Amino acid sequence: MNDPSMVASAMAVGVIGTGHVGLITCLSFASVGHRVTGFDVDASKTETLRQGRMPFHEPGGQAMLEVATASGRLAFTDDIAEAVAGADVVFICVGTPIGASGAANLLAVEQAAREIARAATGPLVVAEKSTVPPGTASQLGRTLGEERPDLVGQLDLLSNPEFLREGRGIEDALHPDRIVVGGSSPRGFAVMRRLYQPFLDAGSPLIETDITSAELAKHASNAFLALKISYANALARVCEASGADIEAVTRILGGDSRIGPDFLGAGLGFGGYCFPKDLAAFAHLSERLGYPFPLLSEVARINDEAVQVAVAMIRDAVSNLEGKRIALLGLSFKPDTDDIRFSPSLTLARALIAEGASVAGYDPVAGAAAKEEIPELQVVDDPYDAATDAACVVIGTAWPEFRALDLARLRELMAFPNLVDGRNFLDSESAEKAGFNYRAMGRPQLRSDPQTSGV
């Protein structure tokens, strides 16, 4: 696909919330020539952005931020009126965390809609980009009308869900595999077509639908991707019991064009902010609508099970966890991000520490955040430091640089030669050649003789 070209006529865009979704939205629209103003209630984050620094790790983000701010096409403010006044379209990109009931907490979305309405100076398209349950638009529409009865019929509410992957967010924003716009306003659709025209010209398909279907689509997409991951992990349990190799089985499955290879990697399971949150919110929503959707709860159960399987595998390798040093390589929930929210690697660390092990963790970018989350975790600056005197090395996150590890050196530093690959990431032959007792998820035929493992 070609890169989106500069637009002939720039539009004014406001973005409410500069988290992962909001900031990447700012960067992508500024990169094609729109004039973008990002707002955040966190004044310290706004100041960081004004200084040209990314508040989180996202490949390509820093360079895009520097270019966009230097060009004058992107600015940041802690005054929402600056982001809304005179804008053609304003995006709501605030968080929707899970509430105590299991439902998505829409307080920030509601507040954003109120403040947008108060600051509006004329006709305006308001687009939900936050992940919200279907029916949210009806509530927000009432809010807009209550706040600005003088602009009834001029504030067009649309749904424009995002499908960004952390660590690949810039790529996904610049080359979306689909652009979804839900609504009922012809003017709103026209504004969004004009806004996205550079991406449409570059080949991205546009799906226009009703607003409820667009709202539901994001939950449905994330739940299905989580389902594929949990299916692979459940299948790994069958492989372990039967002697089959999960990597061979999923390679065969993924070769079917109806299935595809993505999200079929067996391992510690999914984490991050979106999948666990959206899965729980979707389950709560379907229950409230009268359909319990039992498949969703099973997806979550299998995901939790994956970490416990890894704990058992490590325990089996070292014979007894108490007093043993475990080196955990990778702490973020996935590579190319510093996000540790719901990280399976940290869930694993907690479980090992609870059984008396000492855990030394290394991550290229997420070490400080992991240490703050788990004070008992020893965070080091080098994977070889983590492995020194360890009874077992565990791959918790599939960072590409781990493939370049000197496995012979790693083995020499350890007290016992155990390697548990929680992401089926390393080359098994290289690991065994280096002298490791190598274990991988769903690959029982690769497990070496543990007779000198860690007794």
Image (cartoon, rainbow, N blue to C red):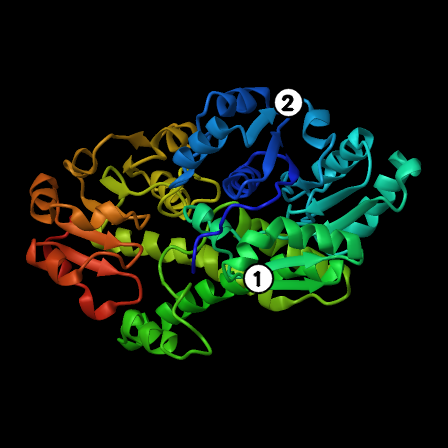
Q: Is residue 405 left or right of residue 176?
A: left
Residue at the extreme right:
149
Task: State which quadrant residue 41 falls in.
Answer: top right
Estimate the x, y position of residue 439 in percent, counting from the top left. 22, 59
Residue pictured at 31% horizontal, 51% vertical: 398
Answer few, some or many: residues within 10 Å of disc 1's Cα (few below 14, many 20 plus, some between 14 and 19): some
Q: Is the N terminus in the top left, top right, bottom left or bottom right quadrant?
A: bottom left
Residue receiving disc 1? 221
Amino acid at the residue labelled 1: Ser
- Give the residue displayed 64% in from the left and 22% down from the top: 78
Above or below — where is 223 with respect to 239? above
Q: Which mark lies nearer to you, 2 or 1? A: 2
Which sits earlier in the primary sequence, circle 2 or circle 1? 2
What is the x, y in percent for residue 167? 41, 46
Q: Which residue is mark 2?
A: 78
Q: Nearer the viewer, residue 132 or 442?
A: 132
Residue 46, located in which quarter of the rendered image?
top right
Asked if residue 287 lies left or right of residue 373, the reply is: right
Q: Residue at x 55, y 36 (%)?
A: 19
- Would residue 160 be seen by someone viewing this image from the given angle? no
- Crowding near the residue tagged with mark 2, few <14, some 14–19, many ≥20 C-alpha atoms within 10 Å: some
Vertical position of residue 165 compared to residue 235: above or below: above
Q: Amino acid at mark 2?
A: Asp
Query: What x and y, as percent, mark residue 212?
Result: 75, 59
Give SS at disc 2.
loop
Using the image, tell me which numbered label, if any, was put on residue 321. Answer: none
| Position of residue 162 measured from the top left corner of the image (x, y, whole percent) | 58, 51
Residue at left offset 27%, top offset 51%: 315
> Are the two marked residues, 2 and 1, in contact with CB atoms closer than 8 angstroms?
no
Q: Secondary structure at mark 1?
A: helix
Question: Could you tell whether 422 is left or right of 22 in the image?
Answer: left
Asked if residue 364 shows in the view, the reply is yes
